[in-house]
Amino acid sequence: MKSSKRQVEEYEKKYGIKMDILTELCGKCYVLDLNGDYNYTECFGKADSEYIKQQNYQLIYPEIIIKFYSYYIVTAKGEHDIWYRGTKNGVNYEFDCYADTLEEIMNSL
C-alpha cells in the first residue's frame, strides 16, 4: 500500500494540479460511523430531522488535510490507507464518505 503522502504526489503529477495541503483545521473532525461515540447534535448542534439527530460519528485526528473547493479530504492518524471526504459543518468538520485511495475519493466529488 502506498503512503498517503506518496498518493498526493502521484495524483498531483498525474493530473497536473497542485493540491492545497493544510497543516491544521480549526475545529474537530467527525466521521459518520454506525458505531460512533457521538451523535449528530453533540458534533454539529441542532438538526432538522430525527433521522439526522440519530446518526453516529467518530472523532478522528487528521494527518494529511487537503482543501479542494468547499471539500476537505483527510487521512486520519493511524489510518493511512483510508481517505475521508467532508465539509465544514458549523465550527466542526463532517466526513460522510471514505475510499481506499486518494484517486477514488477525488472521483466521488
Image (cartoon, rainbow, N blue to C red):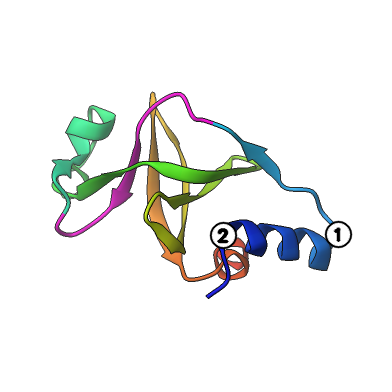
Q: Name the foreground residue: 31 vs 87.
A: 31
- Please state the horizontal and vertical placement of residue 106, each as a whole percent of the image: 61, 62
Q: Which mark is residue 4?
A: 2
Specify the segment rendered in magenta. 24-35
Among numbered discs 2 and 1, the one appearing first in the sequence:
2
Q: Quadrant of the C terminus?
A: bottom right
For the point 55% across and 64% down, which residue is it? 105
Q: Which residue is mark 1?
A: 16
Q: Is residue 53 above or below residue 85?
A: above
Find out whether residue 34 is within the magenta segment.
Answer: yes
SS for callout 2 = helix
Q: Amino acid at mark 2?
A: Ser
Asked whether residue 44 is drawn in magenta, I would say no
Determine whether, in the image, residue 15 is placed left or right of residue 86. Answer: right
Q: Residues within 10 Å of mark 2 (few under 14, many from 20)?
A: many
Secondary structure type for disc 1: loop
| Residue type, mark 1 in image | Gly
